[in-house]
Image (cartoon, helix red, strand yellow):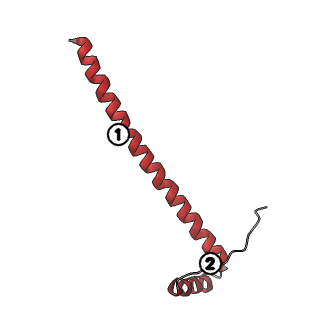
Protein backbone atom coordinates (compact mmCIF):
# COMPACT_ATOMS: atom_id res chain seq x y z
CA UNK A 1 0.00 0.00 0.00
CA UNK A 2 1.26 3.47 -0.89
CA UNK A 3 1.63 5.76 2.09
CA UNK A 4 0.33 9.30 1.86
CA UNK A 5 1.88 12.41 3.38
CA UNK A 6 0.05 15.63 4.17
CA UNK A 7 1.61 18.82 2.86
CA UNK A 8 0.72 22.47 2.92
CA UNK A 9 1.16 24.48 -0.27
CA UNK A 10 0.36 28.00 -1.35
CA UNK A 11 -1.47 28.38 -4.66
CA UNK A 12 -2.44 31.35 -6.75
CA UNK A 13 -6.07 32.17 -6.00
CA UNK A 14 -7.12 31.66 -9.63
CA UNK A 15 -5.58 28.18 -9.64
CA UNK A 16 -7.37 27.35 -6.42
CA UNK A 17 -10.70 28.45 -7.91
CA UNK A 18 -10.07 26.27 -10.97
CA UNK A 19 -9.13 23.35 -8.73
CA UNK A 20 -12.36 23.75 -6.76
CA UNK A 21 -14.45 23.81 -9.95
CA UNK A 22 -12.78 20.73 -11.41
CA UNK A 23 -13.02 18.96 -8.05
CA UNK A 24 -16.76 19.59 -7.87
CA UNK A 25 -17.41 18.72 -11.51
CA UNK A 26 -15.42 15.50 -11.43
CA UNK A 27 -16.37 14.64 -7.85
CA UNK A 28 -12.72 14.00 -7.17
CA UNK A 29 -10.83 15.17 -4.11
CA UNK A 30 -8.44 18.07 -4.64
CA UNK A 31 -5.58 15.89 -3.39
CA UNK A 32 -6.19 13.36 -6.15
CA UNK A 33 -6.34 16.07 -8.81
CA UNK A 34 -3.08 17.61 -7.63
CA UNK A 35 -1.46 14.18 -7.47
CA UNK A 36 -2.58 13.47 -11.06
CA UNK A 37 -1.25 16.85 -12.20
CA UNK A 38 2.14 16.17 -10.59
CA UNK A 39 2.33 12.72 -12.19
CA UNK A 40 1.44 14.25 -15.57
CA UNK A 41 4.16 16.89 -15.11
CA UNK A 42 6.67 14.24 -14.03
CA UNK A 43 5.89 12.04 -17.06
CA UNK A 44 6.19 14.99 -19.47
CA UNK A 45 9.48 16.05 -17.90
CA UNK A 46 10.90 12.53 -18.30
CA UNK A 47 9.72 12.38 -21.93
CA UNK A 48 11.42 15.72 -22.64
CA UNK A 49 14.66 14.57 -21.02
CA UNK A 50 14.62 11.35 -23.05
CA UNK A 51 13.93 13.28 -26.26
CA UNK A 52 16.84 15.63 -25.60
CA UNK A 53 19.11 12.71 -24.72
CA UNK A 54 18.26 10.82 -27.89
CA UNK A 55 18.78 13.94 -30.00
CA UNK A 56 22.19 14.46 -28.41
CA UNK A 57 23.11 10.81 -29.02
CA UNK A 58 22.04 11.10 -32.67
CA UNK A 59 24.30 14.14 -33.11
CA UNK A 60 27.22 12.27 -31.55
CA UNK A 61 26.54 9.19 -33.67
CA UNK A 62 26.51 11.27 -36.85
CA UNK A 63 29.79 12.96 -35.94
CA UNK A 64 31.39 9.57 -35.23
CA UNK A 65 30.10 8.15 -38.52
CA UNK A 66 31.46 11.12 -40.46
CA UNK A 67 34.90 10.69 -38.84
CA UNK A 68 34.88 6.98 -39.66
CA UNK A 69 33.91 7.62 -43.28
CA UNK A 70 36.78 10.09 -43.65
CA UNK A 71 39.19 7.59 -42.12
CA UNK A 72 37.87 4.88 -44.44
CA UNK A 73 38.44 7.06 -47.49
CA UNK A 74 42.02 7.70 -46.38
CA UNK A 75 42.63 3.95 -46.24
CA UNK A 76 41.08 3.39 -49.68
CA UNK A 77 43.19 6.11 -51.32
Q: CA distance from mark 2 to mark 1?
A: 41 Å
Q: Position of residue 19 (x, y in %)?
A: 57, 82
State the SS at label 1.
Answer: helix
Picture residue at 61% right of the left edge, 82% below the top? 23
Q: Specify few, some or many for label 2: CA neighbours under 10 Å numbering under 14, 14-19, or 20 or more.
A: few
Q: Position of residue 56 (x, y in %)?
A: 39, 43
Above-or-below relation of 41 to 66: below
Question: Residue 59 bears which disc, if any?
Answer: 1
Give the residue pinned by disc 2: 9
Question: Residue 33 bears which disc, if any?
Answer: none
Picture residue at 65% right of the left edge, 82% below the top? 27
Q: Position of residue 29 (x, y in %)?
A: 67, 79
The quadrant holding residue 73 is: top left
Q: Is residue 51 left or right of residue 15?
A: left
Picture residue at 43% right of the left edge, 50% below the top? 51
State the SS at label 2.
Answer: loop
Above-or-below relation of 76 to 36: above
Q: Earlier in the sequence, mark 2 or mark 1?
A: 2
Above-or-below relation of 67 to 56: above
Quarter of the rendering occupied by the N terminus: bottom right
Picture residue at 56% right of the left edge, 81% below the top? 11
Q: Specify few, some or many for label 1: CA neighbours under 10 Å numbering under 14, 14-19, or 20 or more.
A: few
Quick one: 28 or 19, which is closer to the camera?
19
The quadrant holding residue 36 is: bottom right
Q: Is residue 33 left or right of residue 74?
A: right
Amino acid sequence: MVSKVKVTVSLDSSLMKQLEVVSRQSRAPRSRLIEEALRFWQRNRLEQQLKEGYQHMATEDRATAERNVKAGWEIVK
